[in-house]
Image: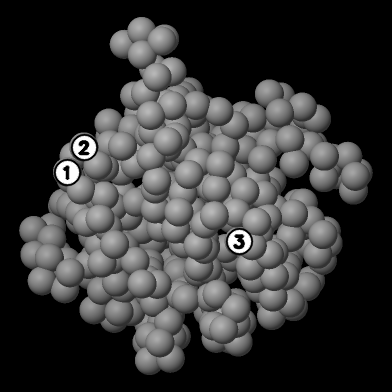
Amino acid sequence: MTATAKTSLREQILALPKIELHRHLEGAVRLNTLVEIARQYKIELPAYDPDGLRSYVQITPDSPMDSTHFLSKFDLLRRFYYSQEVIQRVAREAIEDAFADNIKYMELRFTPKALSKLMNFPFDQVVDWVCQAVNAAQQTCDIKVRLIVSMNRHEGIKEGERALQAALAHRSNGVVGIDLAGQEAGYPGTPFFTLFKTAQKAGLGITVHAGEWAGPGNIRDAILQMGAQRIGHGVRVVEDSTIVQLARECGTTFDALSRTARLYSWRGNAVPRSKSAQRATSKADRLPVSSITRCAIWLILALEQQSIPTILPSAISR
């Protein structure tokens, strides 16, 4: 494909109206914003320009493709949340960037622990700040946004309980679901079973990262024990045909990309190396971890599934 053809394709993709159901706020930070915040708060960084910082917050072509290396990027990204102003700026810019990509509906997930840890902000407070910023941004951008409160397996059930309470307290402000993420290998979902059932009974949507860094059994647990309507990634479901059948019978949707998305590259913020799963929908992790386009995935889905609306029934918020 020629450079001209690639440019034309990007323009066509950008012009398409899109839906995004899997974007992490903490991974959607602009590189320029990281540099500016670091200078403002005198945060020590390995580099103070976007290109120099890139390899520390992105998965590059020569990076190890394992969960430890991937999750290590978030260690650096947690060092910036010094104030309400910073948290709300990051949230606002995430909405502006989605709007610039012509995304019409987005479910944005974020982890209160990540935003609160540095300054020990209360979870309820940081959730409120994100809700305020997101709702304000929607007033000036032609986009509908709903929020998913996330918790990490490796940070324990106590943090999960705090996250759930904050999520429940902000249902009227745009929070529609909860998510389990973090280090999957060595951290089964068992401690979170009751918590997620409580959330489900309270009317929150359920999505769980499972079957990416560990085996397909985590997908079975997410569906049967946690009430997961969507599975984040879940590529290892193909290792067990009985779990594939279970997911089909339960109508579980997998947030995953076709490997075709590896063919395209773009700018700054991007998504991790893409993978295939049984029922691909709208997976776009926003940690700037590779050079894959933020928009190409939507055209790929349209071409491979023949219809963008196929993802709509799986949305947590109708």
Q: Residue at x 50, y 62 (%)?
A: 144
Q: Residue at x 38, y 61 (%)?
A: 209
Which residue lies under the disc numbered 1? Answer: 306
Q: Name the kind of residue labelled 3 in the image.
A: Gln
Q: Secondary structure at mark 1?
A: loop
Quadrant containing the N terminus in the rendered view:
top left
Q: Name the kind of residue labelled 1 in the image.
A: Gln
Q: Name the kind of residue labelled 2 in the image.
A: Leu
Residue 233 shows in the view: no
Q: Is residue 54 left or right of residue 278?
A: right
* Other residues around mark 3 within 10 Å, as few (<14) / some (14–19) / many (≥20): some
Q: Residue 39 bears which disc, if any?
A: none
Q: Residue 303 bears which disc, if any?
A: 2
Which residue lies under the disc numbered 3? Answer: 138
**Labels 3, 2: front one:** 3
* Image quarter of residue 217: bottom left
* Other residues around mark 1 within 10 Å, as few (<14) / some (14–19) / many (≥20): few
Q: Residue at x 18, y 45 (%)?
A: 305
* Image quarter of residue 210: bottom left
Q: Is residue 151 above or below residue 142?
A: below
Label pair 2/1, CB-CB below 8 angstroms: yes
Residue 188 drawn at (x, y percent): 38, 69
* Other residues around mark 2 within 10 Å, as few (<14) / some (14–19) / many (≥20): few
First in sequence: mark 3 vs mark 2 = 3
Residue 243 drawn at (x, y percent): 14, 64
Label pair 3/2, CB-CB below 8 angstroms: no
